[in-house]
Image (tube, grey):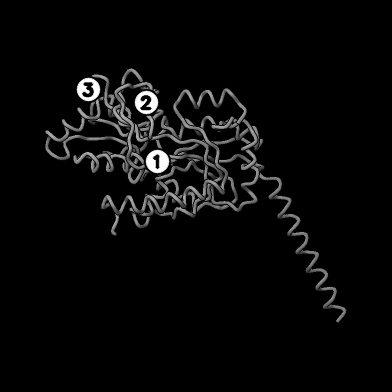
């Protein structure tokens, strides 16, 4: 009986040590570099915002942030890899809504499920915007739609970032609303879609407001998928259609304990509508 | 939130900034999952 009691005490002691050790290790998180995967080409919105966050993350977490690119499947490659990583908080990725919701819906097996991704936070969004080159004969959305109707179905091509993405959905919704057939050309990200329009390889781009600003002078905005217009382009018409805004922020697969430090970012220098 | 430089950069690049923590973020994802399913069915991109 005495031996059993000693055995039980020893077991409790060992379990306590293991628990304290585990808690201690978790509290110290992070102790090494964190990898932040971007699911699209360099130069797009996901990349730009990750770079903006990089310094703030480094400041609060006290470790280096390594930004990598995992491009393919409109982000599906990156997110499907993320859900298979060790859930220790050292690998996170940028997430994009609606992509993370649309891909499992449309692809069936996208390699991940929407709710497998544990969003740490969202902090910005951009609406879809229809862009043509400045030297395009289409000055307004009406011009664009009328010309598309006069051409055989599918001749007008619209480039965008990824499949089952906000740009993809926006192009389909525009086609249906206008009664035209546009051919959507998916690129590995906004960064690689922009040169296609610059080079005249596509008729238009379904992109985001950021590109409308960055390429002001080279591109003309014809429509924006939000309730308000676009100051930079007086001919740009607001959309009364459904919202196809893209929201972004980092996501992970780790237990909440590991994410707590990152959640504290809300109190650090991060942008906010209310600030 | 209080860093004017970060906010300025975001504004200059036409990002709409709004912080949502994990709970609010999850709630938005769940809400949008329902909305997108309806839209995708209407567009004929997934089976009804």
- SS for callout 2: loop
Work out whether mark 1 precedes mark 2 in sequence or the reverse, and give the earlier one: 1
Marks 3, 2 in one chain = yes
Residue toward you, A40 or A14: A40
The chain carrying label 2 is A
Where residue A225 appears, as percent x and y from the top left, is 35, 35
Q: Which residue is mark 3?
A: A136
Work out whether mark 3 precedes mark 2 in sequence or the reverse, and give the earlier one: 3
Query: Residue at the location (33% across, 17% down)?
Result: A217
Q: Which residue is mark 2?
A: A230
Where residue A61 appears, as percent x and y from the top left, is 65, 38
Which quadrant would the N terminus of chain A be assigned to in this image? Answer: bottom right
**Which one is in front in this view, the residue at disc 3 or the one at disc 2?**
2
Could you say which disc has been placed on residue A71 in the image?
Answer: 1
Q: Is residue A215 above or below residue A264?
A: above
Q: Is residue A177 above or below residue A55?
A: below
Give the alpha-carbon distance from disc 3 to disc 2, as whole Å: 18 Å
């Amino acid at each position: 009986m005495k031996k059993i009691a000693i055995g039980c005490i020893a077991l409790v002691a060992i379990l306590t040590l293991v628990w304290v050790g585990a808690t201690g290790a978790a509290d110290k998180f992070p102790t090494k570099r964190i990898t932040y995967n971007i699911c699209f080409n360099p130069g797009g919105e996901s990349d730009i915002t990750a770079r903006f966050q990089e310094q703030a993350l480094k400041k609060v977490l006290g470790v280096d942030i390594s930004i990598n690119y995992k491009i393919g499947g409109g982000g599906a490659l990156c997110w499907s890899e993320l859900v298979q990583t060790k859930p220790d908080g050292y690998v996170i990725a940028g997430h994009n809504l609606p992509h993370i919701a649309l891909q499992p819906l449309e692809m069936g097996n996208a390699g991940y499920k929407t709710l497998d991704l544990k969003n740490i936070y969202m902090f910005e969004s951009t609406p879809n915007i229809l862009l043509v080159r400045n030297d395009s004969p289409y000055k307004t959305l009406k011009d664009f739609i009328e010309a598309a109707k006069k051409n055989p179905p599918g001749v007008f091509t619209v480039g965008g970032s990824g499949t089952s993405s906000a740009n993809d959905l926006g192009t389909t919704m525009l086609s249906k609303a206008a009664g035209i057939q546009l051919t959507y050309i998916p690129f590995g990200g906004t960064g690689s879609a922009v040169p296609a329009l610059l080079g005249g390889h596509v008729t238009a781009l379904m992109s985001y407001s950021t590109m409308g600003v960055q390429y002001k002078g080279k591109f003309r905005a014809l429509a924006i998928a939000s309730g308000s217009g676009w100051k930079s382009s007086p001919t740009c018409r607001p959309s009364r259609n459904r919202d196809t805004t893209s929201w972004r922020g980092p996501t992970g697969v780790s237990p909440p304990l590991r994410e707590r430090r990152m959640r504290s970012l809300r109190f650090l220098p991060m942008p906010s509508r209310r600030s | 939130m209080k860093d004017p430089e970060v906010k300025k950069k975001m504004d200059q690049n036409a990002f709409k900034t709004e912080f949502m923590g994990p709970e609010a973020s999850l709630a938005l994802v769940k809400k949008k999952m329902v909305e997108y399913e309806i839209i995708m069915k209407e567009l004929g991109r997934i089976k009804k």
